[in-house]
Amino acid sequence: MYRRNPALGVIRPPKANTPSKARCGWACLLLASGVVVGARAADADLPLARMPQREFQSRTPWSDPNFFPIAVWLQSPGNAARYRAAGFNSYVGLWRGPTEEQLTTLKQAGMRLICGQNEVALRHRDDPTIIGWMHGDEPDNAQSRRGGGYGPPIPPEQILAEYEQMQRADSTRPVMLNLGQGVAWDNWHGRGVRSRHPEDYPRYVQGCDIASFDIYPVNGESPEVANKLWLVADGVTRLVGWCGSSRLVWNCIECGRIGEVDRQPTPQQVRCEVWMSLIHGSRGLIYFVHQFKPQFREAALLDHPEMLAEVTELNRQITELAPVLNSPSLPAAAEVASANPEVPIDFTMKRRNGVSYLFAVAMRDGSTTGTFVIREGPRSGSVRVLGENRGLPLRDGRFSDHFAAWDVHLYRIEAGGQ
């Protein structure tokens, strides 16, 4: 995202050649060599806002099963009403803020905020607009030196010490730490001397309550990662493994052109990245909406009607399904076989108020047919495909569906007669 500033309350845009999300390849590495063959279930299982290290279940909005964080990164509060209309409910980061004026504007728009602990923010400890503290951005990347060049990443021990300091200033809100591409890409050169040291990450996540990361494969420059959308999911899975059940995992989503003119995701690819993330265990989304080339546009999403329409519909659907998404996953409740071994299908199954849901995504750029077997749930009935105005028969606990490239299908499984 933006280069981290140790002051915590100020986030500055990158200078030229800064190895940050805004400047570098926005890329990630395939974590397992070769193409994944066959079908698999996402193995993430995080109950609603479960953070045993620090308890937030009793505090709004973390106690609300209808709240799913859908955030936008470092945007002007003047656009908060427009983002709210597009289904966003949170801001992460504020330019040189928060200020009193910024907080007032966000409150009027009904927008929640995760921000740095500056003097203004700490004066508003009791303001429900602020729902969390920002612990900085990409401390795991090489850090620019005042005299030029780059030094090593910020050590995990320093992140943990700063986290404890933030807890002492206010222990009633979670602290969010956003990490960089190294979460998913061991060879990411932007980590400098700590490239190919994934063992750093279990230590980094000790310094937060919400661990997030950013990686943008469509905007990526490296041939190792360009257009490998599934690496977003691999990064989420990896971060979930490091965090366990004691911390929430969020991630960032590319939703437009960031740098090169010929690199920008389609609305379908954005939808795929979003649902890959959710299926693999992400419990909060941060959209990166800046454009840096050919000219800088802070709120590029708002000027892209087709992408804005897709993101608005995505946000509406996620908000509607929030109580389901916030429910535990059921990893043994179903299985799937893909007719095309080059296009695996990943899924998660959940149950809410006695109703079963199965969310599935094609993990490669190709078509296939998936055959699902329900192990725990109705054996016969119908399967409603949410948002597609169609249904499928469920017989003997099985149903099949076609997946085009990067397709996402969301199923509500409804019991019927024998």
Image: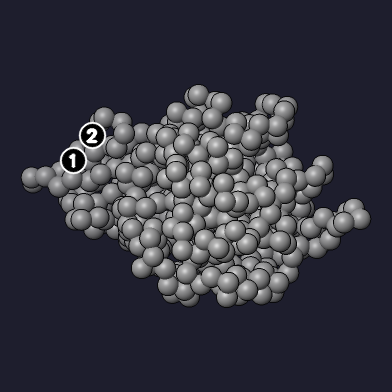
Q: Residue 330: which disc?
A: none
Residue at (77% x, 49% y) in the render: 19
289 vs 279: above or below: above
Three-letter amino acid code of the residue under disc 1: Ser
Marks 1/2 in contact by CB < 8 Å: the verdict is yes
Q: Residue 248 at what x, y percent from top left?
A: 48, 62
Q: Residue 325 at what x, y percent from top left?
A: 36, 52
In the rendered structure, the answer to whether residue 161 lies left or right of residue 174 reads right
Task: Name the secondary structure under disc 1.
Answer: strand
Label 2 belongs to which residue? 391
Q: Which residue is more in the foreground, 368 or 314?
A: 314
Three-letter amino acid code of the residue under disc 2: Gly
Label 1 belongs to which residue? 382
- The residue carrying pointer 2 sits among few (fewer than 14), some (14 to 19) or many (20 or more) residues within 10 Å by Cα, namely some
Q: Report the residue that reaches farthest toward the right.
A: 147
Q: Residue 401 at what x, y percent from top left?
A: 32, 36
